[in-house]
Image (spheres, helix red, strand yellow):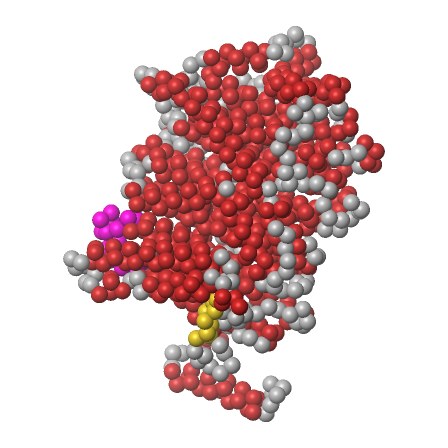
Amino acid sequence: MKAIWLVELVALTLVPPLLVGVIRKTKALAAGRVGPSLWQLHRDLLKLARKELALSGTTTWVFVVAPAIALATALLGALLVPLGTLPAAIAFDGDFVLFAYVFALGRFFTAAAALDTGSPFEGMGASREVGFAWLTEPALFFGFLVLARLSGAASLDRMLRSTESSAWLERTAPLVLVAAGLFVVLLTECGRLPVDDPATHLELTMIHEVMILDHSGPLLALVEYAAALKLFVLSALLLHVVVPAAAFSGWSGFALFLGGLVAIAVAIGAVESTMARLRLLHVPTLLIAAALSSGFALLFLAGGAP
Amino acid sequence: MSAPGLAASGPGGLALLVAAAALLAASGAPELLVNRTGRRAAAAAKLTTALTVLACLIGSWGALVALGGGEARIGLLAPLPGFEVALGADALSGFFALPVFVVGGLCALYGASYWSPRRHPRHLRTGRRLRIGYGLLLASLVFIVLARDGLSFLVAWEGMALANFFLITIEEEEREVRRAGWTYLLYSHVTILGLFALFVLERQATGTFGFATLAADTPRALGTAIFTLAVVAFGVKAGAMPLHSWLPAAHASAPSHVSALMSGVVIKMGIYGLLRTLAGVAEPPLAWGIVLLTLGSVAALFGVAYALAQHDLKRLLAFHSIENIGIILLGLGVALVGRSSGRPAWVMLGLAGCLLHVWNHALFKSLLFLGAGSVVDATGSRDLETAGGLARRMPVTAVLFFIGSIAICGLPPGNGFVSELLVFLGLAGAAMTPGAAWAALPAPVLASTGALAVACFVKVCGVLFLGTPRSAAAREAREAPAPMLVAMALLAAGCAWIGLAPGSLAPAIERCARDWSRQPLPALADLAPFGWVSAAAVALVLVTLLVFLALLPRVRRARKREPALSTWSCGYAASSPRLQYTASSFAEIITARFAWALRPKVHSPRVESLFPAPSRFHSHVGDAILDDLLLPAARGALRATASLRALPQGLLQRYILYILALLVPLLIWALAGGDGG
């Protein structure tokens, strides 16, 4: 392994909370506030990791295991996608299925842990968390099928890094449709507006944040870091769909990767600053539109040459 | 089929399988020899269970030998000229026989405690019938996979149907159970009629009354008729979606360990029959594959949608069987499409997914049904809404149920993930092929099904085991006795083994796939990333364990804190178990989207005055196909044929007259050479 990869890998572990910081900063600036520092979540995580726990008497082992699984699944997800100049650490035919299903495993336990508290609010959050995934998964899989079709490969690494720059231009239309679908998947899966409002103070309106009301100390740190890591991984996936692989080489490629991630975070912040949360009943419409967008891209390619 | 096959390890396997089946059929004999209520009844019951488990051990050995390859065959007497009666064992027989013995043996072990008169006096009356029927059911299942001709297949099939009927209606004093039994019997008759027609057509096409490879020059119409009959007849048995209506009630009504066997093994005989019928078909029309892909997608998606809407634990699991049969059919569909379009890699991947899911579903679904049985036994109710907090009262059952849930959702590191991955790989292969991208359309449907299954099992696990108890019975539930836990633990170990080391099964699956397609296929290990799947599964488990261990000291300290903290309820201090989300409200966000297909029956009170009296809200999702389509159609048919019902009047003489009236013209027609020579 090249030394540069090692340096980058260490640097990348610090990036996920930074992306959350960028989103918060963007929203603060758009609202005319100074906002918290970009490194605020890092400090919060360090502080939480050192604290003692407070556990509700209702909870069982599920409540403690769930954050550990959330971290393990997000880490495994991060190893499956290429990260700019770094190729995916794990690549095999069909790894896109593993990618989708490890996050589903994380979702299973996060929602189960919410029900473990016996709280009506957390049950509500859990219900919503699992209640939208059945529409985001088709959007994600349509996207994967399009990428598989374009690259002729069934592994995420080759799907995202094999296309030549010239060919990439010819395939703008399907890729734009897939990118649009993936962006909505990213917003939904990471609990951002217009699906979920991470900054509200009312438990009734939240999804992800309400599920972790009872988490404290290191458990909360694990959940928060895993959520940031998921945001990072899905952003990297989206970035690789939008930018051809050839652009990511050397230190400039690494800088481009970081810049691209920050740009996506800023875009999320911009969406959050300008949009209100959708009514819950209307969320499926948005998600079906995302699935159709990726599905259309497959339709584009259905008949033509490989 | 040829003599050289005998030289392989086959004959030993066949002998062991036949011996096991005979022992199973006779396992109830000790109980018939003693007085049902006498002193020695308990000893006889133990002996029967012991014989069943012993037969299952012998049979598992035989199935493993048969899986080793080769075809063994013994011809028996031919009762009719032109018909042969033969038993045989090849890899495919072994593959479907092994779950019969593994699940059958473990469920018998579980059943010995679950249905013991010491736990419930009423079990004294039905226990004997249950155990005798159980042995007969297992024996007929084995004979089904051994039958090599239509005649013995039909006899074994009918044996299975009848033995199963008596097991479903064990608790016949309940109206609901009798209804489930009759529906089941009706559907079984449809299947057997279809099978008669199927074998007659097979004889016309191939000259043998039984499963024979359809030649490439079979007339198109005949081939289509055979395929349609096979899909309908075997699809009814397997519970494929529009043909499934017998399944949910039957699975819910049978004793839980019988439900486990039915769901895990018995319905797989439909898949076995379909596989045998389609084995080696040289050039199946593309439409066959498309039909199976469509059927599989519908069964998978709507099976899980119906499951989500249930609040009866066992009905819910039954609908999940329909979902999993859908996944199995998707695998078979991929294999057929691959066969039609000359893609051996798709054949291998699709068939491997189909076969592996047969084993996987046998393991995790029987585990879940046994877990459900323990819960029903402990709380006295199948209703999810009265459970809650059982993880504290039944910790081992809870852990095992969670393992089964992860497996059935297709999540890594469970075994369900491996077989779904194989199906996905086959579908992705189609997506990458110009002109075949349409064949990949089930992939997003399957992905959606997976997400719905996660939603459903978060609901089940959460409402059963987590939170606080919703009823007094749940508050006082007790952990299941050791034999029941051991049976479940062994099934869970099977799930974990396939999830962590799927590569170990590749040779057996490969042999079956090659036997089935009768063409050279690429090696499964080259197509499927078993090594990576193992590595990822192990890594997930290890990282989770490490983080958990790092947290443990602080968790211990937090648990010791006095007084114990309560859950944050946004400042509301008088929290009650009834404030928790219920199973129905948890799933409502999804089931509302499927209301057009689920057609829920809602009885909601209307509030009319200022001070309304207490009232009840009730909603129930039945089965739209049965309630809204078949029953009205049947009532209509009854009305339309009212005048015809004058014919059967219970007079034997009349019936003989009718037979004569039919027979004489047929004889004249035959003697006049009407069959064309």
Estimate the x, y position of residue B176 in percent, counting from the top left: 37, 55
The one nearer the camera, B262 or A6, is A6
Q: Is residue A59 above or below residue B293?
A: above
Q: Which residues are magenta?
A: B113-131
Residue at 44% x, 21% y: name it. B550
The residue located at (33%, 63%) in the rendering is B23
Q: Is residue A21 left or right of residue B483?
A: right
- Compared across the picture, whether B159 is left or right of A264 comes to left
Asked whether residue B112 is drawn in magenta, I would say no
Check if residue B123 falls in the magenta segment.
yes
Vertical placement of A5 versus B187: above or below?
above
**Image point 43% across, 62% down: which residue?**
B13
Q: What x and y, as percent, mark residue B407? A: 48, 41
For residue B136, side relative to residue B307 (left or right): left
Q: Please state, as top left, top right, bottom left or bottom right, where the C terminus of chain B lies in the image.
A: bottom right
Instruction: Name the residue at 68% across, 23% down.
Output: A2
Q: Position of residue A54 (x, y in %)?
A: 41, 17
- Looking at the picture, tell me which residue is in the foreground, A299 or B609: A299
